[in-house]
Structure formats: structure tokens, C-alpha cells
Amino acid sequence: MFENKISELQKNGFIHLKNYFKEDELKHLCNDSANIIKKAKKGSWKHIRIYRDYFSLDGLNIFGVDYPFNHEISNTIYNNFNKLNYKDDLLKILGWNDFKTTVLRLHSNSKFYKYQGTWHRDDQNYPSPNSVQAILYLKDEAGFKIVPKTKNDELEDYFINTKNDNI
């Protein structure tokens, strides 16, 4: 199964593993996430991201919650996340022996407001062969876009660095 994902990653620079986890594996994680978002909207957690400070009837207009594994915001999400069996497969696809995580963030999209950022790279260096961004969607997502490597040169039209140097 992963041989074709490895070649897809090499060709496009990304892969999408749809329905990788079973629903019952994600059930507790979804509940934990909803509880964290609820607490953050009430202002009970200071490590939040609000990209547009629009009025919202159900609390703060949260876009993201930083440090969601901190026991002060949830004492269960870290353990429930660690029950997911993904690490060996991720390492196999990447051809790595191990990895470390530098950013953990729980994103939340409003039912009423749509977030739109500018085209950007998440890594300061391009190319960034020793860096990977893994996203676990707990709900269906339609707005996130990734540019395949084959279209990389077209990013210059959006003033995105496509050269092999530091940004």
C-alpha cells in the first residue's frame, strides 16, 4: 500500500491518506477537541489564535488553540492521540528513523466565518527535505489547498520563494 504513497510523495511533495483512521479510533479525540474548543471560546485558555476578531454568539471566534496537549486544557487528549497508530507508517513513507514535533495546534473553523490566508510556505527554507507537516482532519475539509511540486514554479507569480535558498 505504501509503495504508491512513497512515489506519490516524491512526485507531488505531499500525500493525502483519506479515511486512514477508523471512526471509533477518532471518537474520543473528536470529543476531546470539541471540549477544548468550547473552553477556548469561553476564554478559559490564553493560547489561542483569532485571525479575525468578529462578533460571535458562541464566544470568541477561535481559529486555533495552541498547546492542546497541555493537561491544563485537557487531561485526556494526549493519551487519546497517542492511541492512534500512525508513527510507524509515517516513518515508512518518509524513509526516516524518527521525528520530532515542533508545533501542535488544534484548528477550528467557524460555521459562520470563512478563514482565508495568503499563499505561504510553512517552512523558512525551500526546499525543506528534513521537514514535514502532518495534518489530522477530524471533520471533512474542503478549503485547504496544497500546490504540487510540478506547479512549484508558478508560485513565483504569488511572490512565493521557489529557489533553493533561505526565505
Image: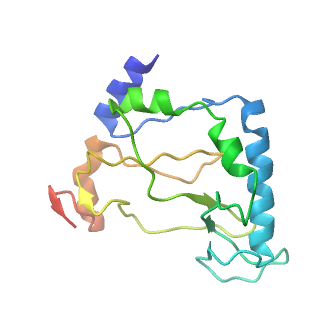
Q: Give residue 67's position: percent from left, percent from top.
A: 60, 64
Residue 111 visible here = no
> Hey, which quadrant is residue 118 in on the image?
bottom left
Residue at 30% x, 66% y: name it: 158
> Hey, which quadrant is residue 7 in on the image?
top left
Q: Give residue 9's position: percent from left, percent from top.
A: 35, 33
* Count of marks placed on residues: 0
> Hey, which quadrant is residue 10 in on the image?
top left
Q: Classify 131 as above or below 74.
A: above
Q: Give residue 166's position: percent from left, percent from top.
A: 18, 64
Residue at 48% x, 45% y: name it: 134
Residue at 35% x, 60% y: name it: 121
Q: Give residue 130's position: percent from left, percent from top.
A: 28, 46
Residue at 48% x, 27% y: name it: 89
Q: Is residue 62 left or right of residue 42?
A: left
In the image shown, does 135 or 118 lie closer to the viewer?
Answer: 135
- Which residue of the protein is positioned furthest toward the right in this rendering? 57
Q: Classify 156 as above or below 93.
A: below
Locate the C terminus by quadrant: bottom left
Q: Classify 60 as above or below 124.
A: below
Q: Is residue 68 left or right of residue 87?
A: right
Render colour scheme: rainbow
Residue 106 visible here = yes
